[in-house]
Image (tube, helix red, strand yellow):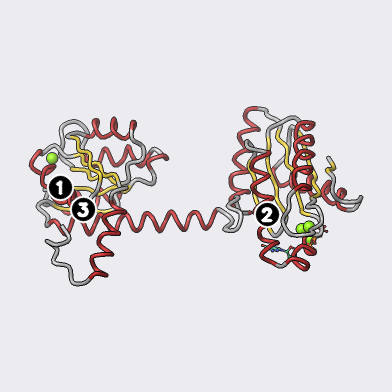
Amino acid sequence: YILKENYRSYEYAFRLLQRLERNAYVKILIAEDSEATRKYIRTILTPQCYQIIDVSSGNQALEVLKSQPDIDLIIIDHSMPGLTGVDLVKILRQKMYYNEIVIIGLSADVRGSLSAMFIKHGADDFLRKPFYPEELTCRIMSTLERRDLVRALRKAAQFDSLTGLNNRRNFYDEGIKLFQEAGRNKRQLSVAMMDLDFFKKINDNFGHATGDAVLVIFAKALIAYFPTALIGRLGGEEFAMIIDEPLEAIIHMLENLREHCAEVKYALEAPPLSFSAGVYQNHTGSLELFLQEADKYLYQAKHSGRGKTCS
Ligand code: GH3
Ligand code: MG
Ligand code: MG
Ligand code: MG
Ligand code: MG
């Protein structure tokens, strides 16, 4: 294939190989009732190394998506027996879990309104039949690139880049949902806030990089000890979690975590890593209130000797 492309340089060939390697992980579903068109698309995409599945109706497409939710992109013809292409787009975009699938509409219809319908209901792009092979591959590449960019931006906006924990914003967004759900189901939640003790000294004595490493170690330990909690880094060396467990169990696990932290060797001749925590549990109240109350207990822990939990 590369030879056929008449490559201009090794660099070009190398980039092409890289692209083909990436493509090999991309799953494309074709929903198109015309066998000739399905074959035509396969002929274009197979040398590009994409994984291809094709079906001849919208309902079959939905079946395939149910069993293979990791499909990246779907090419949808409009006129098909049963569901039309636009119907299928509507169904896909109504279901949250298909939000990230890339959709390219397809039709031989000469009315411009059809491409508008596709896009209005959530397709990412549209192609009118007949099309040149390059038109298809360019649109596939550009829509996938856009999806990857949106994914990366979303991740950067939601998660703390150092620890991978929810950042403050996402912790609040997800936390509010947990509180609403708990209110409906009459479940009693707890909020715990943890702050590392004398963390500034770790930075001062062992360097900022060691401080960073300690934050990562602590975040990982939190996840390991509280696998069911929503955990966030609120800022600096301050962490919070929302958890649906009995208060005694939470306090007990925080003690286990404390023992674990004390054993962590993060630097030569480093003092034991310690943290203070405040926990608040109640059957009513907003996330905001829970955080305020947990913070009061944290303050109490700090000012009564550190290395302890108040609740
Ligand atoms: P206390 O026991 O009262 O909590 O004392 P502390 O030293 O832990 O608290 P303080 O608020 O005085 O200092 C927190 C320090 O955390 C100051 C800041 O430079 C450092 N810090 C905040 N974010 C980061 C980070 O991402 N990486 C590193 N290495 N340090 C950070
Ligand atoms: Mg058709
Ligand atoms: Mg601190
Ligand atoms: Mg502070
Ligand atoms: Mg602090």
Q: Which residue is mark 1?
A: 41
Q: Nearer the viewer, residue 116 or 259?
A: 259
Quadrant of the rendered image holding ligand 1: bottom right
Q: Are marks 1 and 3 in contact (CB under 8 Å)?
A: no
Q: Which quadrant of the figure has residue 136?
A: bottom left
Numbered circle sitting on residue 48: 3
Q: Residue furthest bottom?
A: 9
Residue 288 coordinates in the image, percent (x, y)? 71, 47
Mark positioned earlier in the residue sequence (3 or 2): 3
Q: Which residue is mark 2?
A: 234
- Tell me which residue sits at (61%, 54%) in the image: 163
Residue 197 left/right relative to 127: right
Q: Nearer the viewer, residue 112 or 199?
A: 199
Q: Residue furthest front?
A: 268
Whole-number angstrom distance, CA of label 1 to CA of label 2:
49 Å
Residue 64 coordinates in the image, percent (x, y)? 28, 33
